[in-house]
Amino acid sequence: MADFDPDSRDRLLDLHERLRSVLELPIERDASNWVAEADALVGDLVDREASPTVRRKRLTQVRELLEEVEGTGHERADEHVDAAKRLTVELLGELEESDQ
């Protein structure tokens, strides 16, 4: 994760933790599938260095996966998913700003 600035790294770790927290709760199967895929992509960003292009692609995929989650059937999981959506948008915004 050396390729993320400290604030972005913290947000990425928060995103990863929130997705993992969702998966520990009893949630609907479809939501679980979307969140698990998003978690795998974020986990890859946490574990490996990636170019800005790869980071943008993976985070865009995460955003798209999380947009598929309309509800989890669990209030706390819904809160984590909402926060994960916000964090993903923030991280993508930071990448766009660094391009300018």
Image (cartoon, rainbow, N blue to C red):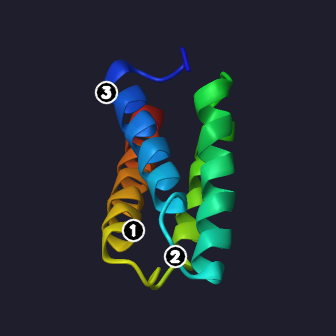
Looking at the image, which residue is at 64% across and 81% down? 30
Q: Which residue is mark 3?
A: 7
Mark pair 1, 3: CA separation: 24 Å
Q: Position of residue 32 (x, y in %)?
A: 61, 71
Q: Quadrant of the N terminus?
A: top right
Viewer can see residue 32:
yes
**Marks 1 and 2: CB-CB under 8 Å?**
yes
Mark pair 1, 2: CA separation: 7 Å
Name the amino acid type tagged 3.
Answer: Asp
Q: Is residue 14 left or right of residue 59?
A: left
- Precedes in sequence: disc 3 or disc 2: 3
Q: Secondary structure at mark 3?
A: helix
- Precedes in sequence: disc 1 or disc 2: 2
In this view, the residue farthest toward the top is 2
- Precedes in sequence: disc 1 or disc 3: 3
- When the figure is inspected, residue 90 is found, relative to residue 79, above or below; the finding is above
- Which is nearer the eye, 100 or 36? 36
Name the amino acid type tagged 2.
Answer: Ile
Q: Is residue 29 left or right of residue 12?
A: right
Viewer can see residue 100:
no
Give neighbour class at mark 2: few <14, some 14-19, many 20+ (Cα, 10 Å).
Answer: some
Q: Which residue is mark 1?
A: 77
- When the figure is inspected, residue 76 is found, relative to residue 62, above or below; the finding is below
- Which is nearer the eye, 97 or 51? 51
Looking at the image, which residue is at 54% across and 14% down? 2
Q: Which residue is mark 2?
A: 27
**Marks 3 and 2: CB-CB under 8 Å?**
no
Mark closer to the observer (3, 2): 2
